[in-house]
Image: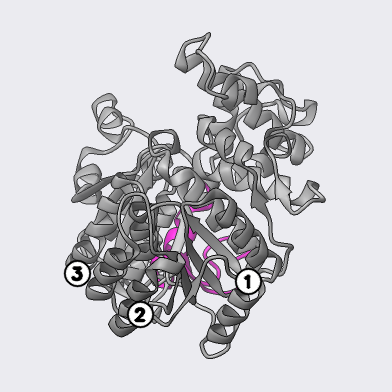
Amino acid sequence: MQHRIGLIEDDPFIGEALSARLDFDGFVCDWYRDGKSARRGLGQRRYSVVVSDINLPDISGEQLFSDLRDSSEGLAPFIFITGYGAIDQAVRLLKLGAHDYVTKPFNVGELVAKIRSLCQHQQPVANAKAQLGISNSMRQIEGLLPRLAASRSAVLISGESGAGKEEVARALHRAGDPEGKTPFVAVNCGAIPENLIESELFGHDKGAFTGADRERRGVFEQADGGSLFLDEIGEMPPTMQVKLLRAIQDRAVVRLGGATPRKVDIRLICATHHDLKAMVETGGFREDLYYRIHVIHLAVPPLRERQEDILWLAAHFLDERASGGEARRTLTPEAKHALTRYPWPGNVRELKHCLERASVLTLTSSLNAESLFGDSGLLAAADGDTPRQALSDHLQQCERAYIRRALTECDGRIADTAALLGISRKNLWEKMRKLEIQGSAGESGGFA
């Protein structure tokens, strides 16, 4: 894992030069241009070294350092950049606990050598904790997780497909088991054929049906002692809703072909992109089951409603790819602008796929707007110009293009495309019909 350096510098020339040099030398550099953004960033991530100018546009470097020192545990070593006339202030900062300082004009190579020397005495650091985002909505959800983990109440997570419901579920599980000693088992209820869903949930005994040559534990038993995440619970067939309700009430399951109840201790987390309350009213979902799983409700907003998270998530996904051994990719200013202007009908999942595709197809180390969006015309529609169509029409246009790209990547295979998009085949067919997208000849026969 690479060492992460925090750079706090409002001068665009110094900041650009230093961040480029640090990237070139193999560091991961996060560049903050004022004290407010630096305070937020340093509170969310751990750094091997922080390099900060003393004179910032909104708060002094000294005040920022003092505040962070008083409120943070294990604060990273600070190196301050100061003008010649502010050496007395830099010395005072050393007495307060800063590690070193350099005076302008300074030798970039010498500063990088100081940074490298400090990094040699510590392990590369990752994020202090798993995070869901930096937007207010996601921070509020994250703040609730420790209390929810302690209660072990059933939790229902709602939100559009790809918005990050499973990540919230995993974060809830980690909040209750930070050492990772218990299982987290996830299953997409909409992706399992109806004739197999009972066996998938509750397991089966040997000889329960043709081909059952050995006993098998279902996901309830696999999650015993940990968390069971039932994604797209709204896709659960009505006949299975009755059996699921019984299993939740009794905290026990009976395997298919068996007769003995098996006790299970699970934290139940469900998720859906449907309006379950409306489904209850129309008879599509059992009311008693609804109230069993709807003890605590967490609503995950779509990505277009939490723009602060877009670049944060983009950096996270690019970090993941770099830590996996790929070349380090950066985003140009135009790319960042395009990412924040695009409405992301596929939400976080679409953002991740967009960055993955661009990283694979782009030969340079930086990703620009064209490498992210190509010449599909969506970029021009999302570049901040005066809107020329209703928001619903624009989102529909973006969703249509996104599904077509996914179909192309999967050579038109509906099952593979649905898996890539994280939705059921039935849901994909419904979207294709609504958006007037033609499927391949071999896949156009129905919802099976």
Which residue is the site of mark 2?
91
Could you tell me how far apart the alpha carbons at marks 1 and 3 are, in whole angstroms? 52 Å
Vertical position of residue 143 compared to residue 238: above or below:
below
In the rendered structure, find residue 150 and report the number of the disc placed on it: 3
Residue 379 shown left or right of residue 10 in the figure: right
Cβ–Cβ below 8 Å for labels 2 and 3? no
- Kind of residue sitting beneath label 3: Ala
Magenta residue span: 194-222
What is the x, y in percent for residue 224? 35, 74
Q: Circle 3 sits in a helix, a strand or a loop, which is it?
A: helix
Residue furthest right as drawn: 363
Single out the residue that lies furthest toward the top. Answer: 388
Is residue 423 positioned above or below 262 on the image? above
Q: Earlier in the sequence, mark 2 or mark 1?
A: 2
**Residue 427 shown in magenta:** no
Amino acid marked by disc 2: Val
Query: CA gap, disc 2 to disc 1?
Result: 19 Å
Labelled pair 1, 3 in contact (Cβ < 8 Å): no
Residue found 58% across the figure and 32% down from its top: 428
Mark 2 and mark 3: span between their CA atoms? 47 Å
Please state the horizontal and vertical placement of residue 337, each as a whole percent of the image: 56, 35
Residue drawn at x 51%, y 87% as measured from the top left: 122
Q: Is residue 431 above or below residue 253?
A: above
Residue that carries the numbered disc 1 in the rendered image: 107
Residue depth check, mark 2 versus mark 3: number of the one nearer the observer: 2
Evaluate whether residue 2 shows in this view.
no
**Image quadrant in which you'd find residue 44:** bottom left
Q: Which mark is residue 304?
A: none
Examine the structure image and report whether residue 221 is included in the region drawn in magenta. yes
> What secondary structure is marked by label 1?
loop
Q: Amino acid at mark 1?
A: Asn
